[in-house]
């Protein structure tokens, strides 16, 4: 399996990269700063660039079987600005499967199912900017013909790998707490081998 990995130098992305390489998969990573990636592996091909560059995306996706995006959001709206380019590059290379790391804010609120969590008191974040950026990605993917899954972790500290967590489609499980970057990456990586959550947002917490 050839995996195109976006956000490979990030907190979750770096763990996904370790998983893929340790299990013998070839990884095609897009990185603004390739020097932040681990020592060179024969299984790792790096394209220097960013997700806002359509040509870099087309290059890094060549011969890939699946795309995993662990891109971070920020004040520059990288997620929502890049997703149209990502979708277009996937279509040009006939790639159907994409797994992305989102946020619990874009899940439905359990107390008010007609609203997203970030729009209600269920969300403890003072700013809604990041959730709004992730929400745009959800809408783009939902309207595409791709086989997408958005992993939506709650509060995401570095933490430790516990190997036991709860998940639920479209909602965050009741009485959520946190979920480490390790268990989030582990869950996302397992989705490569299952079609259980295609076209779903999956809430994730301990």
Image (cartoon, rainbow, N blue to C red):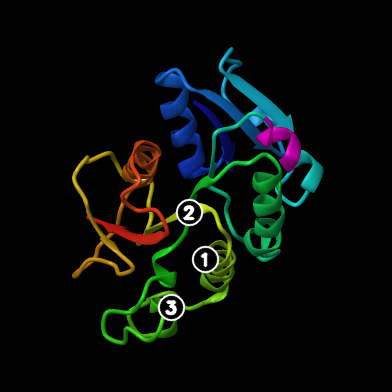
Question: In the rendering, which numbered label is found on residue 148?
Answer: 2
User: In front here: 14 or 107?
Assistant: 107
Q: On the rendered structure, is 64 left or right of 170?
A: right
Labelled pair 1, 3 in contact (Cβ < 8 Å): no
Query: In the figure, is residue 110 to the left or right of 62?
Result: left
Q: Earlier in the sequence, mark 1 or mark 3?
A: 3
Query: Going by the picture, which residue comes out furthest to the top?
Result: 42
Task: Check residue 181 for magenta coloring.
Answer: no
For marks 3 and 2 on the same chain, the one whose residue lies earlier in the sequence:
3
Tell us which disc is closer to us: 1 or 3. Answer: 1
Q: Which mark is residue 142?
A: 1
**What type of secondary structure mainly makes up the magenta span?**
helix
The residue at 45%/35% (across/down) is 16
Q: Is residue 120 above or below residue 102?
A: below
Q: Position of residue 49 (x, y in %)?
A: 76, 39
Could you say whether the residue bearing mark 1 is in a helix, strand or loop? helix
Q: Are marks 2 and 1 in contact (CB under 8 Å)?
A: yes
Q: In x, y percent, where is residue 154?
A: 35, 62
**Residue at point 39% right, 66% down?**
104
- Residue 168, image quadrant: bottom left
Q: Which residues are magenta?
A: 57-62
Instruction: Report the residue at 72% width, 31% height from top.
Output: 47
User: What label does residue 118 carry, if any?
Assistant: 3
Where is residue 155? Give x, y as percent: 36, 61
Can you tell which quarter of the image residue 182 is in? Answer: top left
């Amino acid at each position: 399996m050839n995996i195109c990995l976006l956000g490979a130098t990030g907190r979750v992305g770096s763990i996904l990269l370790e998983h893929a390489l340790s299990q013998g998969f070839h990884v095609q990573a897009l990185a603004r700063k390739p020097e932040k990636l681990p020592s060179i592996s024969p299984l790792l091909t790096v394209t220097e660039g960013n997700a806002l560059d359509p040509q870099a995306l087309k290059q890094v996706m060549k011969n890939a079987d699946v795309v995993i995006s662990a891109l971070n959001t920020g004040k520059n709206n990288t997620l929502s600005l890049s997703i149209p380019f990502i979708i277009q590059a996937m279509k040009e290379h006939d790639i159907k499967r994409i797994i992305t790391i989102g946020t619990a804010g874009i899940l439905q609120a359990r107390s008010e199912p007609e609203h997203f969590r970030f729009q209600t008191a269920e969300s403890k974040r003072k700013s809604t900017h990041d959730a709004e950026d992730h929400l745009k990605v959800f809408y783009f993917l939902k309207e595409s013909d791709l086989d997408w899954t958005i992993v939506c972790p709650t509060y995401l500290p570095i933490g430790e790998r516990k190997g036991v967590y709860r998940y639920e489609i479209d909602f965050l499980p009741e009485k959520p707490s946190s979920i480490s970057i390790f268990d989030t990456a582990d869950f996302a990586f397992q989705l490569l081998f299952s079609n259980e959550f295609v076209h779903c947002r999956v809430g994730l917490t301990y």
